[in-house]
């Protein structure tokens, strides 16, 4: 999967969507946020990632107000994509995954960051390949990270997710709960964007 090409496509699509939106409108899937808040968040994230790619440890993060929020987002998204393009996927970079300290981590992470937040401001069915890779990221990285940091607990047994394209499993191998849906619905449900029947696993909260 060419995460960088897909990331560039997603940022371009998001800019196109944002230009037609009321920045003061609420974002239903992010309670308390307006579209402007979401844009400021993503702009700050992209600026943060550029700093992380300098491989100098965790960079500072801020969401300073911009007079032209959408224009500022477009500039910082473009700068991030250009910085990622200039680096090989295996180039060293600071990340919050101690097992993957490379620029490639950010190619993938930012693809899913933007894809889900684009859904936040204008819901759409995520591409099945992107959604499936996002589920892999959650089950292979985010959920184990949350457990390891003591941020969440998961029940005994195994969660099985089944889409028309493939299936996933997370847990100790014993049967517990199976949920079926499109890959788009499954990843959006894991991130709390749509209602998804996760059984006892529904208490596992995901936060980056």
Image (tube, helix red, strand yellow):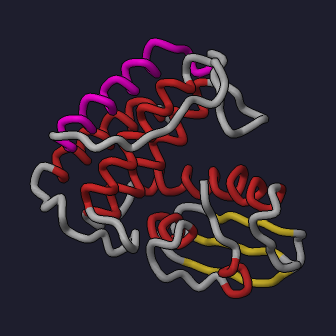
First to last magenta residue range: 68-90
In x, y percent, where is residue 40? 33, 47
Q: Which of the 4 quarters of the picture holds residue 33? A: bottom left
Q: Is residue 64 above or below residue 54?
A: below
In x, y percent, where is residue 65? 28, 44
Return the residue nearer the eye: 165 or 67. 67
Residue located 26% across and 47% down the image: 14
Return the residue nearer the eye: 46 or 68. 68
Return the residue nearer the eye: 138 or 174. 138
Residue located 68% across and 87% down the image: 199
Q: Is residue 75 above or below residue 12?
A: above
Q: Say whether residue 62 is left or right of residue 33.
A: right
Q: Is residue 177 above or below residue 208?
A: below
Q: Is residue 102 magenta?
A: no
Residue located 19% across and 68% down the image: 25
Q: Is residue 86 magenta?
A: yes
Q: Which of the 4 quarters of the picture holds residue 13? A: top left
């Amino acid at each position: 999967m060419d995460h960088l090409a897909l990331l560039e496509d997603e940022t371009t699509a998001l800019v196109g969507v944002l230009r037609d939106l009321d920045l003061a409108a609420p974002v239903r899937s992010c309670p308390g946020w307006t579209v402007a808040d979401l844009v400021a968040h993503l702009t700050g994230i992209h600026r943060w990632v550029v700093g992380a790619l300098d491989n100098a440890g965790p960079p500072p993060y801020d969401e300073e107000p911009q007079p032209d929020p959408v224009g500022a987002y477009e500039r910082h998204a473009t700068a991030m994509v250009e910085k990622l393009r200039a680096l090989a996927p295996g180039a060293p970079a600071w990340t919050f995954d101690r097992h993957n300290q490379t620029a490639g981590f950010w190619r993938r992470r930012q693809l899913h960051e933007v894809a889900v937040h684009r859904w936040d401001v204008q819901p759409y069915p995520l591409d099945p390949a992107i959604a499936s890779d996002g589920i892999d990221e959650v089950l292979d990285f985010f959920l184990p990270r949350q457990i390891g940091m003591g941020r969440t607990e998961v029940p005994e047994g195994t969660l099985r997710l089944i889409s028309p394209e493939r299936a996933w499993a997370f847990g100790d191998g014993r049967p517990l709960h199976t949920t079926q849906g499109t890959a788009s619905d499954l990843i959006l449900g894991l991130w709390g964007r749509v209602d998804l029947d996760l059984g006892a696993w529904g208490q596992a909260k995901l936060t980056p």
